[in-house]
């Protein structure tokens, strides 16, 4: 059987998506420096709660803690945000007139430490935008052993919200132990899938779905049958009823569902299940390559270069150039204009191949939360088919234009591809693609 090959591939794939040492060292340096600045600026008093819940490697003499994906141990090398809380003793709460006033104080401390870095308030956190990562700092007051109060500038001036990050970490650690690490591995792999599939899902939602899966299935998997685990997981989440929120693992707090994931999960389940039923490893690894993209394909030696024939390989890949962490939805629309015709063609709905000489106009519609002045816009056009190969013009280069519009003209037969990428702080935060079928 192909068990040994499967185990080796998944081991290597997981090693590839883990945070590398250089990035981890850089994060830790910034995290520790920010903590030290807060300790000095806020007159730190040691926080030593009689915490009843056991957490691994938790040192309660600290004033700050990593939370979010990094705190739960489910982060990957494309995770662009490090979430941290800074615990301010409750006796100091009266020093701040409002949640906004607290965040302003935190922002000023970070900005003074990093004067050349963009530091801004974002609802309930202060965000420092470094080149390799964003650090989201949430100042909190300890309410009790399980709960912390945090500021929310979208609420009333005197309102404080409740967060329970350590309960989420406890649940993640319990599942890590009870599943022999399957929980952590599946959380990490699902992050790669959401980026490949252009699904706007938070790390907390992913970890919650994976936690619910293991709570429901009571199954254990070995590395050699991880493809079965992946199939079972996609089947599980594909039939979850649509909802605006789910209850987060451990804390049961509301975690927002930003994007529909069920249909894409269903397609992954059906295709992977069909491949598994063939009992041919080549079919299984092909579908896994579709699910996890180029980073997995590198491990199986299948980068799908056969279509270029004798042409030069000029295609570029955004994942080889920048980190990808999908946070927003964008949508490419396209129209075709033909000389002598008054009616334009909707390229999304047009069911027939396009003739030559059609002027193509593509426009990317941005999520309303994306600010044009804070992002960069890149376009990619890939020609496919015999004519593009014969004329050595497959293109595929990624070009920064910073324009929401892109123009092309139909020239070669083939099923061509147009992609758009939105980058902020050198991180791909949104992407979309559209296929264009041309028959001259």
Image: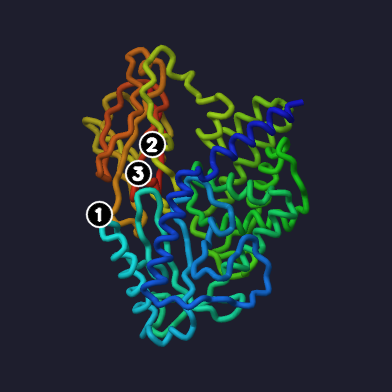
Q: Quadrant of the C terminus?
A: top left
Q: Earlier in the sequence, mark 1 or mark 3?
A: 3
CA distance separating discs 1 and 3: 21 Å
Cβ atoms at labels 1 and 2 below 8 Å apart: no
Q: Dot 3 corresponds to which residue? A: 333
Q: Secondary structure at mark 3?
A: strand
CA distance separating discs 1 and 2: 22 Å
Residue at left offset 53%, top offset 29%: 298
Instruction: Say if 220 sits above or below 344 in the image.
Output: below
Cβ atoms at labels 2 and 3 below 8 Å apart: no
Q: Which mark is residue 321?
A: 2
Residue 352 point in image, percent of width and height: 41, 30
Q: Earlier in the sequence, mark 1 or mark 2?
A: 2
Rendering quarter of residue 128: bottom left
The residue lying toward the viewer, choosing from 28 and 403, is: 28
Instruction: Say if 199 sits above or below 135 in the image.
Output: above
The residue lying toward the viewer, choosing from 172 and 342, is: 172
Residue 230 point in image, percent of width and height: 66, 43
CA distance separating discs 2 and 3: 25 Å
Instruction: Say if 26 sits above or below 167 in the image.
Output: above
The residue lying toward the viewer, choosing from 416 and 402, is: 402
Q: Secondary structure at mark 2?
A: helix
Q: Residues within 10 Å of mark 3 (few under 14, many from 20)?
A: some
Q: Earlier in the sequence, mark 2 or mark 3?
A: 2
Q: Residues within 10 Å of mark 1 (few under 14, many from 20)?
A: few
Rendering quarter of residue 60: bottom right
């Amino acid at each position: 059987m192909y068990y040994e090959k499967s185990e080796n591939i998944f081991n290597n794939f997981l090693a590839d998506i883990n945070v590398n040492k250089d990035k981890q060292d850089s994060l830790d340096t910034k995290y520790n420096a920010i903590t030290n600045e807060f300790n000095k600026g806020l007159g730190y008093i040691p926080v030593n709660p009689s915490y009843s819940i056991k957490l691994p490697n938790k040192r309660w003499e600290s004033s700050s803690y990593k939370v979010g994906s990094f705190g739960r141990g489910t982060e990957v090398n494309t995770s662009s945000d490090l979430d941290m809380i800074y615990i301010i003793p409750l006796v100091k709460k009266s020093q701040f007139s409002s949640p906004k006033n607290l965040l302003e104080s935190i922002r000023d401390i970070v900005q003074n430490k990093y004067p050349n870095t963009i530091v801004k308030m974002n609802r309930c956190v202060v965000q420092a935008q470094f080149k390799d990562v964003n650090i989201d700092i949430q100042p909190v007051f300890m309410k009790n052993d399980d709960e912390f109060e945090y500021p929310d500038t979208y609420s009333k001036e005197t309102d404080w919200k409740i967060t329970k990050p350590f309960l989420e970490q406890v649940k993640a650690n319990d599942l890590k132990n009870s599943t022999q690490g399957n929980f952590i591995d599946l959380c990490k792999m699902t992050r790669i899938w959401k980026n490949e599939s252009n699904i706007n899902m938070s790390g907390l939602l992913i970890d919650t779905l994976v936690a619910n899966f293991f709570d429901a299935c009571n199954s254990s998997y070995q590395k050699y049958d991880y493809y079965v685990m992946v199939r079972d997981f996609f089947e599980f989440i594909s039939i979850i009823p649509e909802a605006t929120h789910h209850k987060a693992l451990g804390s049961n707090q509301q975690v927002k569902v930003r994007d529909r994931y069920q249909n894409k999960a269903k397609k992954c389940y059906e295709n992977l299940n069909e491949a598994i039923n063939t009992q041919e490893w080549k079919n299984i690894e092909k579908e896994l390559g579709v699910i996890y993209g180029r980073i997995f394909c590198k491990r199986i030696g299948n980068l799908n270069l056969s279509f270029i024939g004798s042409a030069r390989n000029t295609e570029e890949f955004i994942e080889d150039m920048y980190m990808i962490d999908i946070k927003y939805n964008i949508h490419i629309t396209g129209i075709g204009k033909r000389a002598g015709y008054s009616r334009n063609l909707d390229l999304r709905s047009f069911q027939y191949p396009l003739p030559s000489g059609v002027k193509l106009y593509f426009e990317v519609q941005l999520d309303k939360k994306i600010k044009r002045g804070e992002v960069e816009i890149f376009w990619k056009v890939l020609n496919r088919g015999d004519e593009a190969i014969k004329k050595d013009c497959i293109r595929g280069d990624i070009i920064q234009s910073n324009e929401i519009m892109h123009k092309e003209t139909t020239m070669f037969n083939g099923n061509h591809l147009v992609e758009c990428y939105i980058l902020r702080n050198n991180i791909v935060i949104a992407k979309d693609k559209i296929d264009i079928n041309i028959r001259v």
